[in-house]
Amino acid sequence: MDDELPPDEAEDRIVSAIDGLRESAGTLEGGAFSRSLKAFLGLSNGEATAEAWAATLIGGLDSVIESTDERFQFDASTGEYAWDADTKQWVENGSSDGIVLEFPATQGATSKNATFELSQYSDTPLAIDGETVYLPTSGVASLRVDDDEVFAVDLEGVDYTTEEGLDIPIPQSFALEILTAPHTHTFTLDENSGTEYDFSFDLANGDQRVAGISVGAQLATDNYDELQGTDVEELSGELRIGPDLTIPYTIQVGELAAFDDPTEDQINDRIDATVQSQGQEIATLRFDEASERIEVVYSDGSIDAASTFYENFLDEVEAIWSDYLGDEALEAGFDALSVE
């Protein structure tokens, strides 16, 4: 490594980046979107105490949302609608270029303090197994509670592939931005060729990057319905943690898939991953077969188990999401992820 960083300082930088993730997770859990969602569903330890009320409100949209042959008719559905708590129906209040819904943000509220608006929508017809289906290509929507925007979606540029034999169409490209206040989630998928794709995801809090990942995939074939493990030749990209820490990686997937039971050397020879802080390499990653774990190797050869850095973070994420999914579901999910 150039300008080698002492192991203690390298470890401090990794810990600092993970701490930033922890703080951001708390911000997301206590943010405007999370509070609004919990209040709307009456969420507590995975139980939605207002589920019946919310289901009635959402189910009532069938009376105002137009569809023909299972195709959403956006233009025919536009207008302003308000929820009538007495009749438990949506009532049209006026005209609009989009679909505007006004309703109480919580069960039992007397004011309609939430507004959802779908301001733009487009779709495309696709032939699947001899039938025509319509899937979205773009759309813009937002949700405001007490005049504060807590949720928004902006989808554009969706292009699909529909090869014979595929059960569902596969997006070849799209750009998607989702606001769950205060965080913004940005997804992009680009098809460079029939066998090369780039995917990227970034999570930001305002202008500050929280986390992200990019994946470049090189395939041996563009026959997706018969894709095998060995047909994914290479994956490369980087994992981003906070504004400063990145983990660039390259994985020779096709070569690894060709081994029935790859050895430690065969795995490490085909996976190249480093830990970088502000562009400076501060450690490398390797797989240790004896302990069955990923290890962080510092400039002097000293080692930490990678799990040392994220175990406590996962415990805190588990506690946060227990309100949404319940303790039992989360424990099962995190047990499945308990790989050192």
Image (cartoon, rainbow, N blue to C red):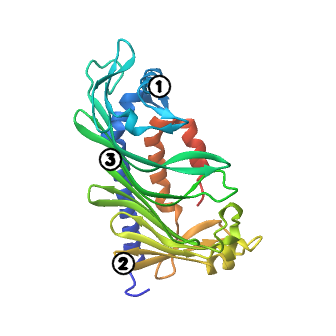
Give the class, few, some or many, for how many residues have Cα within 10 Å of label 1's Cα (few <14, many ≥20). few
Q: Quadrant of the N terminus?
A: bottom left
Query: Which amino acid does the dot numbered 2 rest on?
Result: Gly
Query: Residue 242 vs residue 207: left or right?
Result: right
Kindly give the residue lying farthest to the bottom in the view shown: 2
Instruction: Determine whether the residue tagged by mark 3 lies in a helix, strand or loop.
Output: helix
Instruction: Determine whether the residue tagged by mark 1 lies in a helix, strand or loop.
Output: helix
Q: Percent position (x, y) of residue 72?
A: 47, 38
- Name the residue tied to disc 1: 59
Give the class, few, some or many, for how many residues have Cα within 10 Å of label 2's Cα (few <14, many ≥20). few
Q: CA distance from mark 1 to mark 2?
A: 51 Å
Q: CA distance from mark 2 to mark 3?
A: 27 Å
As drawn, 112 above or below 209: above
Q: Percent position (x, y) of residue 12?
A: 37, 68
- Name the residue tied to disc 2: 279
Query: Which amino acid does the dot numbered 3 rest on?
Result: Thr
Kindly give the residue lying farthest to the right in the view shown: 260
Sequence order check: which comes first, mark 2 or mark 3?
3
Tell me if I can see residue 303 in this picture: no
Sequence order check: which comes first, mark 1 or mark 3?
3
Instruction: Determine whether the residue tagged by mark 2 lies in a helix, strand or loop.
Output: loop
Query: Which amino acid does the dot numbered 1 rest on?
Result: Gly
Sequence order check: which comes first, mark 1 or mark 2?
1
Kindly give the residue lying farthest to the left in the view shown: 147
Query: Residue 85 vs residue 49: left or right?
Result: left
Q: Quadrant of the C terminus?
A: bottom right
Q: Which mark is residue 27?
A: 3
Residue lying at 53% horizontally and 46% vertically, measured from the top left: 134
Q: Percent position (x, y) of residue 140?
A: 35, 47
Q: Mark 1 or 2, which is nearer the eye?
A: 1
Which of the pair 121/321 is nearer the observer?
121
